[in-house]
Each structure stands twice: as structure tokens, then as C-alpha cells.
Image (cartoon, rainbow, N blue to C red):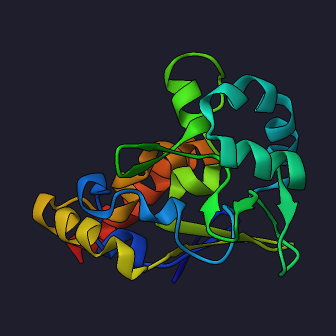
Amino acid sequence: MFQLGKTIISEDILEKEFVCNLSACKGACCVDGDAGAPLNEAETKIMEEIYPTVKPFLRKEGIEAIEAQGTWVTGTDGDLETPLIDNKDCAYVIFDGQTALCGIEQAYNQGIVDWKKPVSCHLYPIRVKDFTEFAAVNYDKWDICDDACSLGRELEVPVYKFVKEALIRRFGEDWYLELEKVAQELKNS
């Protein structure tokens, strides 16, 4: 672990390798697990605002779940998150054949909304836990992502480079440039 500004960072994000391999996992992270995607308070307001615009991109089951539960929910641990369909699929998930995709991201890709998706989804496999004085930045190892780890090793792409855009979105470009310096120092030592 090391500190960068007001973040405590696991060295795993510099040392482990990862590149999403949707052709292998079929977007399992959007349909497996026991909770929705983590959200922050500002994102809950965005979800409420964009829902009418994103709704046409969603599946009937997702729309029903959102209209029954809300555009976001408070999970069993008290955290804010996306609602689920039957305690499984994220309510915002859509499918391209067998592959799970994000309905919000599809609307973003078509220029319909200007918000890509929750930052927690964009950051994956990094998870950020905010505390009063700092944020913990950790690598989340999940067996459904074994193919992504293999592809990352094959392509030699560390986690932090794979999620560069999301890290900049969450912490800013200056923070990311400092992270790159730390990574280079670690590599040279």
C-alpha cells in the first residue's frame, strides 16, 4: 500500500494485469454477484435525471425493476447501488446476443446522454471505498475475470493502465500522472 494525496492505494493495481475480455466472460460482472453497482450520492441524482432518456435502451424486466424499486436503491449494507432484477442482473443491463452490456453506456455511445455509466462500473476491477479523510483504492480479484487477467498478462497491460480513463474521471489527471510516476519508480526498483 502507498499513499497518493488523499488516497491509499494497493500496489496490486500497478502489479496485476487486466484487460476485459467480453468475448470470454460475456459481461458476467453485470449479472453475477449479490448487489447492484455501487453509486455515490451525486450519481443517484444523475440516475434519476437520465432515466427517462435511457429507458428506451433498457429491457422490459429492467424497466419493471426500476419502476418498482427506483432508479437506485440502498443496499443491505447501507450503500447506494443500482437496483437488481430478481436479485441478480443489474436493472440497467441489456444483452447483445449472450453478452451483457450497460444500457446507460449504450445511450452514451449513441450521444443520447453525456454520462457514460456509474464510475464504479467504469473503474472495474478497481474498487474505491471512501472514508472521512481518505479513499482506499483496491484491486478486486473476482474469478469471473480470470480471462481478463490472462488477456492482461498476454498484452502486458497493468490494471491502472486499463482503467486510465476511469481513474482520471474519478481522481483527476494530475493524480493519474502521479500514479504513473509511482508505477515507473516501482518498476525501476
Q: Position of residue 86 (x, y in %)?
A: 70, 67
Vertical side of 32 occupied by 168: above or below: above
Q: Between residues 67 and 122, which one lies in front from this camera angle?
A: 67
Q: Position of residue 160 (x, y in %)?
A: 40, 59
Q: Where is residue 29 in the image (x, y as percent from the top left)?
A: 48, 65
Q: Between residues 162 and 59, which one lies in front from this camera angle?
A: 59
Q: In which quarter of the image is residue 60?
A: top right
Vertical side of 14 occupied by 178: above or below: above
Q: Quadrant of the C terminus?
A: bottom left
What residue do we see at 49% from left, 79% from top? 10
Judge from the rendering whether residue 90 lies leftward or rightward of residue 96; answer left or right: right
What residue do we see at 43% from left, 64% from top? 28
Vertical side of 107 occupied by 48: above or below: below
What residue do we see at 43% from left, 52% from top? 163
Report whether residue 116 is seen.
Answer: no
Report whether residue 16 is seen.
Answer: yes
Q: In which quarter of the image is residue 117?
A: top right
Q: Quadrant of residue 27?
A: bottom left
Q: Between residues 53 and 154, which one lies in front from this camera angle?
A: 53
Judge from the rendering whether residue 189 lies leftward or rightward of residue 176; answer left or right: left
